[in-house]
């Protein structure tokens, strides 16, 4: 995640080239492995246990390591060890920049200061981006007036990281009454709260979500691709419904809507958050309705 934010800044300011950035990303992907795979390789988890934990993640908004501890498969020290093997995303990207001879350590440190200053990030937000801590940095991208959207946006982003890819970057969102878009897949929820959640794009960037969730490379945006995105929205909304149920708030999910060349309208407006997944642009769209009386 940090590589997407800081890497994009370096590209926009012509500190590194596209080729250098690609080399750094190849380095990171070769040196950062999913926690479950490391645990299997280290003999701390069986394939069956890892598979069960992956399935549990589709039912609970919890990290892989936390679920492993809850299930009694791993101890806290086991998880700490695995995380150390996985690597710190900030340090790995800095190491990639150095080893690919893109920038010197002194140049990197200066660029980091400029990156923080130019974006107006506090020390807390900066550290959160370095650590990939969505809850801590997300408020810097969502206007205070729409803070009630933070829990669902955070859940959606965490779901992307867990089920699709951690190579994600977001930009500041906006509240709009309508949005023209080429491709869209979203799902309405009804009950105590009426709203919707989904993804849209004016390019084939939405394929990054479709391919990542389907676990196969999709080369065109067709109904099958949008269906995969729709299934992903259903997964997120399912997790959201489970969280709301603990607050005695009940919602039901309607079938996902898959649309081409459409205008999404909402009388009271909805939130649009631009996101880049593996460098490909799409948008998260969310409407949180008032509780029915």
Image (cartoon, rainbow, N blue to C red):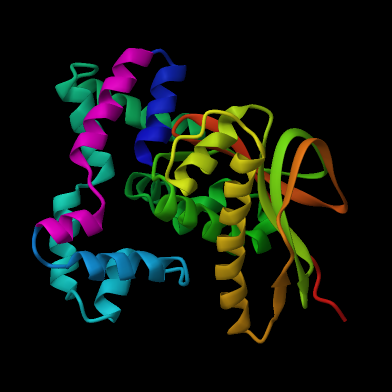
In the image, residue 34 lies in the stretch drawn in magenta: yes
Quadrant housing the N terminus: top left
Residue at image position (78%, 70%) is 190
Residue at image position (63%, 48%) is 227
Image location (x, y in percent) of residue 286:
70, 54
Image location (x, y in percent) of residue 79:
19, 66
Q: Which residues are magenta?
A: 15-41
In the image, residue 125 lies in the stretch drawn in magenta: no
Q: Is residue 99 left or right of residue 7?
A: left
Q: Is residue 183 left or right of residue 99?
A: right
Toward the viewer: 23 or 43? Answer: 43
Q: Is residue 22 left or right of residue 248?
A: left
Q: Is residue 133 left or right of residue 66?
A: right
SS assignment for the magenta stretch, majority: helix
Classify residue 240 by image quadrant: bottom right
Q: Is residue 109 visible?
A: no
Image location (x, y in percent) of residue 282:
60, 36
Quadrant housing the C terminus: bottom right
Classify residue 225 by image quadrant: top right
């Amino acid at each position: 995640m940090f590589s997407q934010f800081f890497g994009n800044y370096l590209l926009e300011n012509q500190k590194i080239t596209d080729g250098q950035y690609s080399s750094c990303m190849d380095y990171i992907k070769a040196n950062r492995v999913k926690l479950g795979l490391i645990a299997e390789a280290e003999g701390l988890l069986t394939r069956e246990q890892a598979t069960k934990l992956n399935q549990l993640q589709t039912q609970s908004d919890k990290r892989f390591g936390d679920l492993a501890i809850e299930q009694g498969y791993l101890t806290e020290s086991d998880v700490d060890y695995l995380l150390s093997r996985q690597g710190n995303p900030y340090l790995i990207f800095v190491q990639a920049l150095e080893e690919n001879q893109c920038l010197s350590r002194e140049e990197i440190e200066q660029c980091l200061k400029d990156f923080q200053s130019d974006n107006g990030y506090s020390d807390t937000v900066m550290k959160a981006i370095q650590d990939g801590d969505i809850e801590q940095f997300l408020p810097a991208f969502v206007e205070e007036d729409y803070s009630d959207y933070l829990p669902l946006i955070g859940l959606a982003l965490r779901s992307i990281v867990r089920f699709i890819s951690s190579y994600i970057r977001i930009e500041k969102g906006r509240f709009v009454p309508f949005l023209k878009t080429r491709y869209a897949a979203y799902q309405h929820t009804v009950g105590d709260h009426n709203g919707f959640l989904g993804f849209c794009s004016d390019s084939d960037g939405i394929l990054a979500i479709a391919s990542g969730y389907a676990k196969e490379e999709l080369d065109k945006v067709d109904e099958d691709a949008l269906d995969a995105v729709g299934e992903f929205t259903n997964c997120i909304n399912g997790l959201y419904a489970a969280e709301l149920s603990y607050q005695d708030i009940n919602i039901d999910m309607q079938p996902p809507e898959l649309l081409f060349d459409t205008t999404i309208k909402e009388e009271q407006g909805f939130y649009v958050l631009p996101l880049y997944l593996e460098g490909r642009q799409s948008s998260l769209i969310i409407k949180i309705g008032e509780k029915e009386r």
